[in-house]
Amino acid sequence: MDENSINLDQGWFVVQTYSGYEKKVKEDLLERADTYNMADKILRVEIPMETVRKEVNGKMKDVEENLFPGYVLVEMNMTDEAWFVVRNTPNVTGFVGSHGNRSKPTPLFEEEIQEILRGMGTADAEPQEINFDLFVGKKIRIIEGAFAGMETAITGVNGDHVKVEVDMFGRRTPLELDAHQIEDVKE
């Protein structure tokens, strides 16, 4: 490859890890990037988080939740060396988009990563009063957060919180949303 060609292996990649080890993997990746002089190859490591309102010990609190348990996003130049460092980091189980047989993964589309990064913003929305019934099977559209614009069906209701599943990285991912984060889909 000559110097003037475009590097198609640069971008955001989804790294699989054991659920609950995302922060440790992020720390280890950043540390290994320094140790192996890969700071110019392993650029950023993000754990998509979202602030949700939950009842904790009888009181409502804002709690940070991982949007994608078991996944970490890594912005990197996918060289052989950087790929080796990331995939051999403790608690990393692989890459999403790798087709086996030690093949390198493909990066996320720019639209996908921009939507995820926008959803990580901390825009505080005033809870809105909902004017439709919440029930299992009800078709809704997500209007706030990383999944804004996606349509799905309610799989569970707990007060003013709903459970849904969305397709992410080729698998169903469960989410819990506040009622003000959704709107009715007229059928």
Image (cartoon, rainbow, N blue to C red):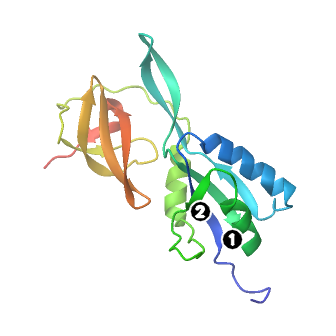
Q: Which of the marked residues, 2 or 1, is nearer the chain's N terminus? A: 2
The correct choice, above or below, for 139 with respect to 56 in the image is: below
Which residue is at a point 69% across and 81% down the rendered structure image? 6
Which residue is at a point 63% across and 66% down the rendered structure image? 11
Quarter of the image where the N terminus is located? bottom right
Which three-letter amino acid code belongs to the residue tagged 1?
Met
Residue marked by disc 1: 78
Residue 13: assigned label: 2
Which residue is at a point 42% across and 26% down the rendered structure image? 126
State yes or no: discs 2 and 1 in contact (Cβ < 8 Å): yes
Q: Secondary structure at mark 2?
A: strand
Count up the numbered dots.
2
Q: Quadrant of residue 95?
A: bottom right
Q: Can you name the residue that lies furthest to the bottom here?
A: 2
Looking at this view, is 80 or 18 the one in front? Answer: 18
Residue 28: assigned label: none
Q: Is residue 88 left or right of residue 32?
A: left
Which x, y percent locates residue 177? 36, 35
The correct choice, above or below, for 95 with respect to 17 in the image is: below
